[in-house]
Amino acid sequence: MDGLPPVADAPRLELELKLVPASDREEAIQVAWVAHLDGGDAPLAVKRWWVATLRQRRRERTNEL
């Protein structure tokens, strides 16, 4: 994948990004970059962002009923 931040655990970051659908991957890469620039763990940030996004979407679907 192009445009990823230079992290020590690049395979882990790529794995986390593969779990995110292509339609949301651009935003996930931005989350990885922000975490990297803040000195955080980019793969963990992507995972946490994706879990939070799924949770939010589930709540939104539930509220529509």
Image (cartoon, rainbow, N blue to C red):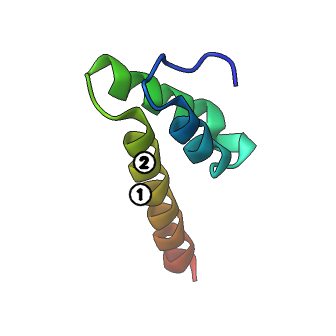
Q: Is residue 31 left or right of residue 19?
A: left
Q: Residue furthest left?
A: 39
Q: Position of residue 46 (x, y in %)?
A: 46, 42
The residue lying at 72 percent from left, 42 percent from top is 23
In the rendered image, the vertical position of residue 15 relative to residue 6, given as above or below: below
Whether label 1 touches label 2, CB < 8 Å = yes
The residue lying at 49 percent from left, 18 percent from top is 5
Residue 1, numbered circle: none
Label 1: which secondary element: helix
Residue at image mark 1? 52
Identify the image quadrant of residue 25. Answer: top right
Identify the image quadrant of residue 18. Answer: top right
Q: Is residue 3 left or right of residue 21?
A: left
Q: Quadrant of the N terminus?
A: top right
Identity, as a three-letter code, of the amino acid under mark 2: Trp
Identity, as a three-letter code, of the amino acid under mark 1: Ala
The residue lying at 38 percent from left, 44 percent from top is 44
The one of 7 and 4 positioned closer to us in this rendering: 7
Q: Quadrant of the C terminus?
A: bottom right
Residue at image mark 2? 49
The residue lying at 48 percent from left, 16 percent from top is 6
Label 2: which secondary element: helix
The one of 60 and 50 positioned closer to us in this rendering: 50
In the rendered image, the vertical position of residue 38 relative to residue 53, given as above or below: above
- Number of other residues with Cα within 10 Å of mark 2, as a class: few under 14, some 14 to 19, many 20 or more: some
Q: Is residue 19 left or right of residue 59?
A: right
In the rendered image, the vertical position of residue 48 relative to residue 12, given as above or below: below
In the rendered image, the vertical position of residue 59 relative to residue 48, given as above or below: below
Q: Position of residue 52 (x, y in %)?
A: 41, 57
Q: CA distance from mark 1 to mark 2?
A: 5 Å
